[in-house]
Image (spheres, rainbow, N blue to C red):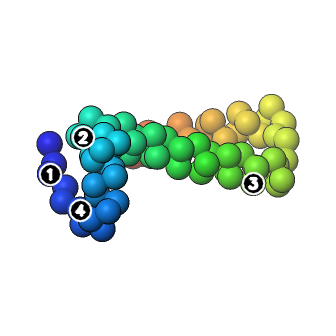
Amino acid sequence: MTTVQITLPDELAEEATRAGLLAADRLEALLREELRSARLSHLRTARAKCAADPLPTMTADEIQAEIRAYRAEQRCATYS
């Protein structure tokens, strides 16, 4: 576990304490939710970018060529 020390204005600290927001379990829940929200926002942005500029459709031969190239690369990496 990591201990974190923060500095807050007195009024805010008092109000947050009364609301139970400074309890370790509540702070953990708030931080986890904020991180989850940030990841979802990042995902939405990436999805919108992909939708706005989709990759061209690959043929079955192109897909197979990519698979072969990847496998060859992996074999080379294994023996290096």
Q: Which residue is mark 4?
A: 6
Q: Nearer the viewer, mark 3 or mark 4?
A: 4
Q: Which residue is mark 2?
A: 23
Mark 2 Cα shell of 10 Å, populated few (<14), some (14-19), many (≥20) = few
Describe residue 4's horizontal placement relative to residue 21 as left or right.
Answer: left
What kind of residue is marked 2? Ala
Residue 27 visible in the current orientation? no
Label 1 vs label 2: CA separation? Answer: 13 Å
Please give the name of the residue rendered at 27% of the width and 47% of the height, measured from the top-left corner. 17
**Mark number displayed over residue 3:** 1
* Occupied quadrant, residue 28: top left
Q: Mark 1 and mark 3 in contact (Cβ < 8 Å)?
A: no
Residue 24 visible in the current orientation? yes
Which of 61/24 is in front? 24
Establish if 65 lies above or below 54: above
Please give the name of the residue rendered at 81% of the width and 47% of the height, measured from the top-left corner. 51
